[in-house]
Image: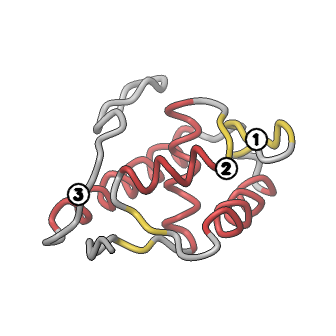
Amino acid sequence: MNDVRRLRLRGIELRYTLTMHLFDHGPTTITSLVEALAAQGFDVGRPAPKSVSDALRWEMRRGRVRRLGRGRYGPGQMPRGTEHRIHQRVLALRAENRSEPGTEHGDLGGDSCGRRGGC
């Protein structure tokens, strides 16, 4: 079994990372979100789909995430200040994850973004 240590995302870190992924990449499924987190070197625990759906439900109440169908979510609306704060926090998590010895990561778009006003 692969003994790679991954940074565990929980709570606000998980919610922000998922929300930013939806804003950067558009609508997607829970399975794709779990795979994207794993490719970036993050772990969400078990069962991963339940953890992700719980986090997305929390973000839905704030309007930042929309449910498009069963297991499918997309970006909602977010004030620019909130978007900037979330983006900065996710960048810090990615940097922390890269500096952890023994972690693997895949760069899904790096630090670039396609949002209004730049990064």
Q: What residue sits right under mark 3 in the picture?
A: 95
* Left or right of residue 35, residue 3 in this image: left
User: How many marks do you count on the picture?
Assistant: 3
Quadrant of the frame with the C terminus: top left
Query: Circle 3 sits in a helix, a strand or a loop, which is it?
Result: helix
**Dot in front, 3 or 2:** 2
Task: Determine the residue positioned at 67% across, 49% down.
Answer: 30
Task: Determine the residue positioned at 67% across, 37% down.
Answer: 75
Residue 103, compared with residue 77, is above or below; it is below
Tag 1: Cα neighbours inside 10 Å, few (<14), some, or many (≥20)?
A: some
Residue 30 is marked as 2
Residue 15, compared with residue 81, is above or below; it is below
Q: Position of residue 100 (x, y in %)?
A: 18, 70
**Dot in front, 3 or 1:** 1
Indicate which disc, 2 or 1, sits on the residue closer to the N terminus: 2
**Residue 28, quarter of the rendered image:** top right
Task: Determine the residue positioned at 64% across, 41% down.
Answer: 78
| Mark 1: amino acid | Arg
**Residue 113, quarter of the rendered image:** top left
Q: Nearer the viewer, residue 23 or 35?
A: 35
| Mark 3: amino acid | Ala
Q: Position of residue 66 (x, y in %)?
A: 78, 41
Measure how far apart labels 3 and 1 are at the Cα level: 28 Å
Measure how far apart labels 2 and 1 are at the Cα level: 6 Å
Is the residue under label 1 in contact with that under label 3 (CB below 8 Å)? no
Q: Position of residue 36 (x, y in %)?
A: 47, 47
Query: Circle 1 sits in a helix, a strand or a loop, which is it?
Result: strand
Measure how far apart labels 3 and 2 are at the Cα level: 24 Å
Is the residue under label 1 in contact with that under label 2 (CB below 8 Å)? yes
Q: What residue sits right under mark 1 in the picture?
A: 72
Residue 89 is marked as none
Indicate which disc, 3 or 2, sits on the residue closer to the N terminus: 2
